[in-house]
Amino acid sequence: MRHQELIEIAKAGLGEFQLAKQGLTAGSVSCALMTNKGTIYTGICLDLAYGIGFCAEHAAIAEMLKARETVIDYIVTVSSKKIMMPCGRCRELMIQVSKENLNTKVVVDEKSYMILSDLLPKHWI
């Protein structure tokens, strides 16, 4: 799969919508990942009060884990404006799910990626 295809799958999940109260939303950020088995999982962010929301990467990884897969080959996160880098919490999550995810290719633009281990050098695991 090319980067652009995974990016398009991630973009398909976008679409911010209002939740219970003004300022509580979901869907402003979307993620798509492909496992080492070639399976694709997606997720959207939840922007909620008191820090109880979560990133789109967390949602996609949870979907992957439900299928008992743990190794991510590629991951991409998007907003309506750009391709985004996973935050530190998401990078840490990927590594704690599987040490093999140190080799995950994190898509940074339409044509390139970085290896997760380069984004978290000298990791403690």
Image (cartoon, rainbow, N blue to C red):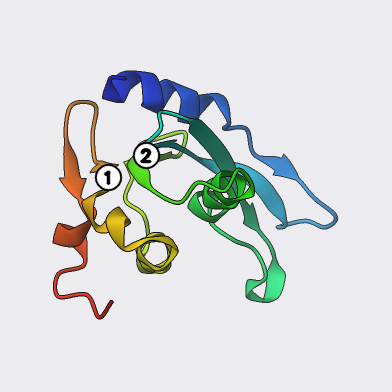
Question: Which residue corresponds to the image point at 23% horizontal and 34% vertical from the top-left?
Answer: 109
Residue farthest right in this picture: 20
Question: Which residue corresponds to the image point at 54% horizontal and 55% vertical from the top-left?
Answer: 58
Kind of residue sitting beneath label 2: Val
- Residue 92: percent from the left, percent from the top? 37, 68
Kind of residue sitting beneath label 1: Val
> Is disc 2 surrounded by few (<14), some (14 to 19) or many (20+) residues within 10 Å?
many
- Residue 56: percent from the left, percent from the top? 53, 49
Q: What SS does tag 2 mark?
A: strand
Q: What SS does tag 1 mark?
A: strand
- Is 98 drawn above or below residue 40 in the view shown? below
Q: Choose between 55 and 105: the one closer to the eye.
A: 105
Task: Name which quarter of the figure residue 116 lies in.
Answer: bottom left
Question: Which residue corresponds to the image point at 24% horizontal and 40% vertical from the top-left?
Answer: 108
Distance CA(mark 1)–CA(mark 2): 6 Å
Check residue 122 in the rendering and tell me which mark sits there, or answer none.
none
- Residue 78: percent from the left, percent from the top? 42, 38
- Residue 65: percent from the left, percent from the top? 57, 51
Question: In this rendering, would 121 be left or right of 28?
Answer: left
| Number of numbered markers | 2
Q: Quadrant of the N terminus?
A: top left
Contact check, label 1 and label 2, Cβ < 8 Å: yes
Check residue 76 in the rendering and tell me which mark sits there, or answer none.
2
Question: In this rendering, would 102 be left or right of 8?
Answer: left
Task: Name which quarter of the figure residue 38 lies in.
Answer: top left
Q: Choose between 124 and 84: the one closer to the eye.
A: 124
Residue carrying label 1: 106
Instruction: Tell me which label, 1 or 2, sits earlier in the chain.
Output: 2
Q: Quadrant of the C terminus?
A: bottom left
